[in-house]
């Protein structure tokens, strides 16, 4: 459990301590929620964040929105004023259930009488695919009320399905995207697989592929990483061109020749959009448009192969959900219906060429060289997290992910201050994997204090801070709109001193070899390190 306490949750934290549940004390509830969600997703269980009432609870808006749009299983619990308080008691009283109901699929109040029903239901709801958030409150008074029933009597763990009135169903409570994306909304769940459906859908795809000259498989967020081996086998044995959306980087090995690139608003997006436009068959395998900031997914035909509803519970019209494992097994049992000799070669070459289109700005490092230097020394199992900004576009497109679940970014929500918190969650979930957070200097100044958390809880990782003295992505957008440069730049805060103030070693370099050596040393010694790398924000547009 991750969080930051207030007096109202101390009893719960103490009970948890005695039950053997560690409390990862963080420096901001928002960061705790992000770390919990990443921890949860990597462990295949809901991550849990605990906050106090009022302000602590209010700080959960960002992680709950992130869990909602980025399909992360997060159970958030905060304190609340007890029911029986006089109506005149308004101190720290917020309508928390109303605030979070639109983004949490289950909202409820824990009482002594319902705890064995409500908590398992909340946990089960988080794990309904697409994964998402549940939000519970517990007053300090109820926390002291003896519970009715016991685990295993009224509830049976994650499997409990409730019909509670506050479980979000299809329709009106769900905000947002239905007007933009065509499709119907259904209560999230995985399809109950029928092998006939899987064989039929595999047959339909084989028929479509027979006539295709330039098919492109685009794999997206709603894919289950457990199917990575099947997917790899399929696209490799059939030599199919494949692209991924940023949040599933690593589901296929991005160093292989049939990898076309990362689709969904990263660097070289023009090249990727052109490649998609040039495809005569786009197969959307678990493709979730929540990651895509353009409209190609709505404007061109897509051969959808979905196992679960997408974020927001959307299923495109006419699409029948299918069990991906059965579907992929049915495909690899057959011979490929045609051959496609590198139909996207020119796009692949263009994409890679952009990475090398370096300038010689003195005193700064060409952004492409940061990726290259780090990729040369970091082991393939390294988990990379990014924050949000130009550096996310860079790493999202060009970091050569080789293994599933090794790349983490906020993309459905695209919320800054994700990278460092995600790195803590990732390192605690996978202590043996090296973790690298690539963040901008803007995002770093939002939650650098969590470096102290990482040291204290024994979660060392490498942070690379791309220093350009600006919110560069926004500065680029300002220029694109032909607006005057205004309020998108800031004075430097010394990254190295910030690291040191948090008890972490830091250094600054604009030399790629030095960067690589420093990162390799930190991996070898399994210690935290912050590396500040000056970049010229004028370089980024060459990569976009
Ligand atoms: C919480 C939040 N606030 C604002 C934004 C809008 N925004 C997107 S990118 C960006 C700039 C980020 O700057 P920095 O962290 O320095 O990264 P850079 O773009 O320079 O690589 C901003 C302000 C956002 N996505 N999230």
Image (cartoon, helix red, strand yellow):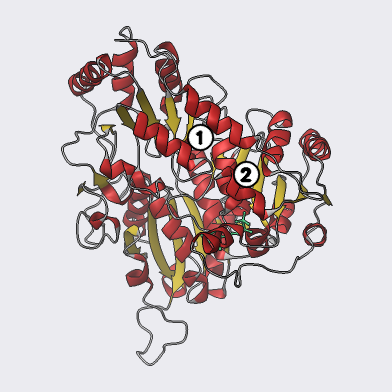
Question: For disc 1, does the CB lie below 8 Å from ligand 1?
Answer: no
> Observer-nearest residue: 178 or 114?
178
Task: Count residues near mark 1 (Cα–Cα under 10 Å), then give few for <14, some for 14-19, many for 20+.
Answer: many
Q: Which residue is disc 1 drawn over?
A: 249
> Observer-nearest residue: 196 or 245?
245
- The answer for how far apart the CA atoms under marks 2 and 1 are is 20 Å
- Residue 302: percent from left, percent from top: 27, 34
Picture quarter containing residue 511?
Answer: top right
Q: Earlier in the sequence, mark 2 or mark 1?
A: 1
Q: Residue at x 39, y 61 (%)?
A: 135
- Residue 187: percent from left, percent from top: 23, 48
On the rendered structure, is 517 left or right of 260? right
Q: Quadrant of ligand 1?
A: bottom right
Picture quarter containing residue 452?
Answer: bottom right
Q: Residue furthest front?
A: 482
User: Helix, strand or loop at disc 2?
Assistant: helix
Q: Which residue is disc 2 drawn over?
A: 428
- Residue 156: percent from left, percent from top: 33, 44
- Residue 227: percent from left, percent from top: 41, 26
């Amino acid at each position: 459990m991750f969080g930051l306490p207030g007096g109202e949750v101390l009893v719960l934290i103490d009970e948890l301590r005695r039950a053997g549940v560690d409390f990862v004390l963080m420096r901001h509830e928002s960061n705790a929620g992000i770390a919990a969600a990443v921890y949860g997703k990597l462990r295949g269980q809901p991550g849990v964040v605990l906050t106090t009432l009022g302000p602590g609870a209010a700080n959960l808006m960002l992680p709950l929105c992130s869990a909602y749009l980025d399909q992360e299983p997060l159970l958030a619990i905060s304190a609340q004023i007890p029911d029986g308080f006089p109506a005149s008691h308004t101190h720290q009283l917020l309508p928390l259930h109303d605030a979070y109901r639109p983004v949490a699929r289950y909202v409820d109040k824990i009482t002594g009488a319902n705890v064995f029903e409500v908590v398992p239901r909340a946990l089960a709801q988080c794990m309904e695919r697409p994964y998402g958030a549940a939000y519970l409150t517990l007053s300090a008074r109820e926390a002291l009320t003896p519970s009715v029933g016991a685990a295993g009597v009224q509830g049976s763990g994650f499997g409990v399905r409730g019909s509670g009135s506050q479980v979000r169903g299809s329709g009106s409570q769900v905000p947002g995207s239905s007007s933009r994306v065509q499709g119907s909304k259904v209560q999230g769940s995985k399809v109950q697989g029928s092998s006939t459906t899987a064989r039929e859908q595999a047959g339909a795809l084989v028929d479509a592929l027979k006539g295709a000259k330039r098919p492109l498989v685009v794999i997206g967020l709603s894919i289950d990483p457990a199917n990575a081996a099947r997917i790899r086998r399929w696209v490799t044995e059939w030599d199919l061109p494949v692209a991924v959306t940023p949040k599933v980087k690593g589901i296929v090995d991005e160093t292989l020749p049939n990898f076309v690139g990362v689709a969904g608003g990263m660097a070289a997006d023009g090249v990727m959009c052109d490649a998609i436009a040039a495809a005569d068959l786009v197969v959307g395998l678990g493709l979730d448009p929540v990651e895509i900031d353009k409209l190609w997914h709505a404007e061109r035909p897509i051969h959808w192969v979905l196992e679960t509803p997408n974020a927001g519970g959307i299923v495109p019209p006419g699409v029948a959900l299918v069990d991906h494992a059965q579907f992929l097994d049915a495909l690899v049992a057959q011979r490929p219906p045609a051959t496609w000799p590198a139909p996207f070669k020119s796009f692949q070459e263009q994409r890679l060429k952009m990475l090398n289109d370096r300038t010689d700005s003195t005193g700064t490092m060409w952004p492409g060289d940061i990726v290259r230097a780090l990729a040369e020394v970091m082991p393939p199992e390294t988990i990379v997290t990014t924050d949000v900004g130009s550096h996310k576009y860079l790493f999202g497109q060009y970091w050569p992910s080789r293994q599933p679940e090794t790349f983490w970014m906020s993309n459905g929500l695209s919320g800054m201050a994700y990278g460092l918190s995600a790195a803590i969650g990732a390192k605690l979930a996978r202590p043996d994997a090296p973790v690298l957070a690539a963040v901008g200097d803007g995002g770093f100044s939002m939650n650098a204090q969590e470096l102290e958390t990482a040291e204290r809880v024994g979660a060392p990782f490498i942070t690379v801070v791309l220093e350009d003295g600006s919110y560069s992505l926004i500065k680029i957008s300002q220029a694109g709109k032909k607006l005057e440069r205004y309020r998108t730049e800031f004075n430097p805060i010394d990254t190295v001193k910030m690291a040191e103030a948090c008890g972490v070693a830091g250094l600054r370099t604009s030399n790629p070899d030095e960067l690589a050596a420093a990162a390799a040393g930190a991996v070898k010694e399994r210690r935290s390190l912050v590396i500040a790398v000056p970049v010229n924000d004028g370089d980024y547009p060459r990569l976009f």
